[in-house]
Amino acid sequence: MHWIRPLAALSAFGLLLTAVGCAKQVTGVARVDATGAPLAVTEDGFGIVAGFDDAPVKIEIYTEPQCTHCSDLQHEFGEQLADSISVGTLQVTYRPLTFLDDDYDGYSAKVANALFLATEAVDNSAATGTQLQRFVEELWINQDPGGAVFTADELRDMAVSAGLPEAVADHVATDSEAVDVAEMDDTNFGLLFDIDRVDTGTPTVFDLDAGEKLDIFDDEWLSSLLRSH
């Protein structure tokens, strides 16, 4: 069984990213989030957008559920990402990949599918972009590379801990198909390969406005990016 670690217990915990990622071979005004940062799926159906459309900073994060460096990214910057999404200074598009799975329906596929399930409204309840970011934190902080896939109860517990509405958390636990994971992986890897054909790996953070890959091994990359707008 996975050990579900609440985010609060790790709020003071910081990890420095190492210089190696997981690789596949081959001008806005800050505001209080009164109604909830929007949450949507990209037009191509394989990315998840968390945050306001008029956010001055827009980034894509390419991430693999079993990539330990992606977990480091959430440990170190997850809270800042959530806060920035909430106040409207940042919009994040998550593009999951599953290249570390041995099977088409493995650990990474289940986590990726859970993220897309979290975007779906259920019984007039819907998650916010901030809650989605916190769900990402929960999933990656409780990461178990090569381990057993999360159980329904574990997925629900993490969804509830992230603040998702009860109905949405229950929906996440159903494990119903929310995305074609194989097509998602092919599409998102193609986009990632176009960004960097030499060092094609995760985590990769891409500045959508500048059209460039960000140096996330600089501890101040996110603060500097937010200050620049």
Image (cartoon, rainbow, N blue to C red):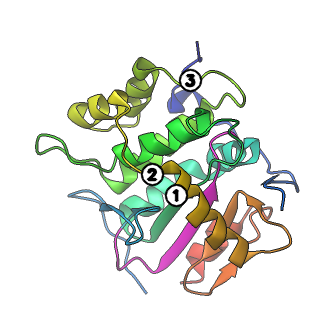
Regarding residue 205, the answer to whether it shows in the image is: yes
Residue 11 at x, y = what percent?
A: 58, 37
Q: Residue at x 43, y 27 (%)?
A: 155
Residue 180 at x, y = what percent?
A: 45, 51
**In-image side of 164 versus 4 (left or right):** left
The span picked out in magenta is 52-66
Is residue 160 positioned above or below 119 on the image? above
Q: Which residue is mark 1?
A: 184
Residue 64 in magenta?
A: yes
Distance (Cα) linking label 2 and label 1: 6 Å
Q: Considering depth in this image, is 96 or 36 the residue closer to the camera? A: 96
In terms of image quadrants, where is residue 204? bottom right
What's under tag 2, amino acid-wise? Asp
Q: Which mark is residue 180?
A: 2
**In-image side of 29 versus 222 (left or right):** left
Residue 104 at x, y = what percent?
A: 59, 40
Q: Residue at x 50, y 77 (%)?
A: 57
Distance (Cα) linking label 2 and label 3: 29 Å
Secondary element at tag 2: loop
**In-image side of 64 versus 197 (left or right):** left
What's under tag 1, amino acid-wise? Met
Q: Considering depth in this image, is 95 or 206 the residue closer to the camera? A: 95
Q: Residue at x 38, y 52 (%)?
A: 130
N-terminal of the pair, mark 1 or mark 3, is 3
Q: Which mark is residue 5?
A: 3
**Cβ–Cβ under 8 Å for marks 2 and 1:** yes
